[in-house]
Amino acid sequence: KVTVDQIEQDHLRKNLPAFRVGDHVRVTLKIIEGESERLQAFEGTVIARNNTGLGESITVRKVSFGQGVERIFPMNARVIDHIDVVRTGRTRRAKLYYLRGLKGKAARLRERE
């Protein structure tokens, strides 16, 4: 008898690195424009990680030209080519929404050993 969990296991991505909330990551996406396909990177701090299994997603925040930009990525989506961990951050919370109100050096996180 096949269960939902067994079907989910077949569709989960195996090539994702281990990272936590507070880490600085570079998410490389496959962008399809007409016939051509290219890779585009989105680099920022993981401020939230939601759900588990097939529906897992991460929220990545960066500051671009003085404007805060957040993007939600489904972890198991085909548009994600790969994820690189640039820096590890030390945090004491599961959600870092407080970073939205901080600017500049105040928004930095300490490095995790």
Image (tube, grey):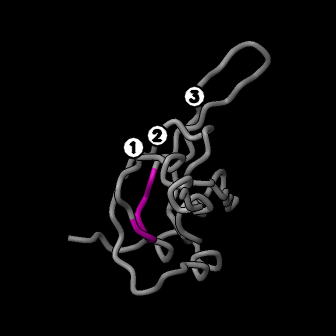
**Towards the viewer: 8 or 103:** 8
Whether residues under marks 3 and 1 lie with C-beta atoms below 8 angstroms apart, the answer is: no
Alpha-carbon span between mark 3 and mark 2: 10 Å
Q: Residue at x 67, y 60 (%)?
A: 70
Q: Does residue 23 show up magenta in the picture?
A: yes
Mark earlier in primary sequence (3, 2): 3
Kindly give the residue lying farthest to the front in the view shown.
1
**Tag 3, which secondary structure?**
strand
Dominant SS of magenta comes to: loop
Residue under label 2: 82
Q: Earlier in the sequence, mark 3 or mark 1?
A: 1
Seen at 59% across and 37% down, the residue is 29
Res 108 → quadrant: bottom left
User: Would residue 14 appear left or right of 47 to someone viewing this image?
Assistant: left
Q: Earlier in the sequence, mark 1 or mark 2?
A: 1
Instruction: List the residue tagged with mark 3.
Output: 39
Extent of the magenta region: 20-25
Residue furthest to the left: 113
User: If the image is split into quadrants, where does the N terminus sit?
Assistant: bottom right
Residue type pointed to by label 1: Asn
Name the residue tied to disc 1: 15
Amino acid on which disc 2 is placed: His
Question: Residue 54 appears in which quarter of the rendering?
Answer: bottom right
Q: Residues within 10 Å of mark 2 (few under 14, many from 20)?
A: some
Q: Taking 22 as reference, is 64 left or right?
A: right
**Residue 111 position in % (x across, y down):** 29, 69
Q: CA distance from mark 3 to mark 1?
A: 17 Å
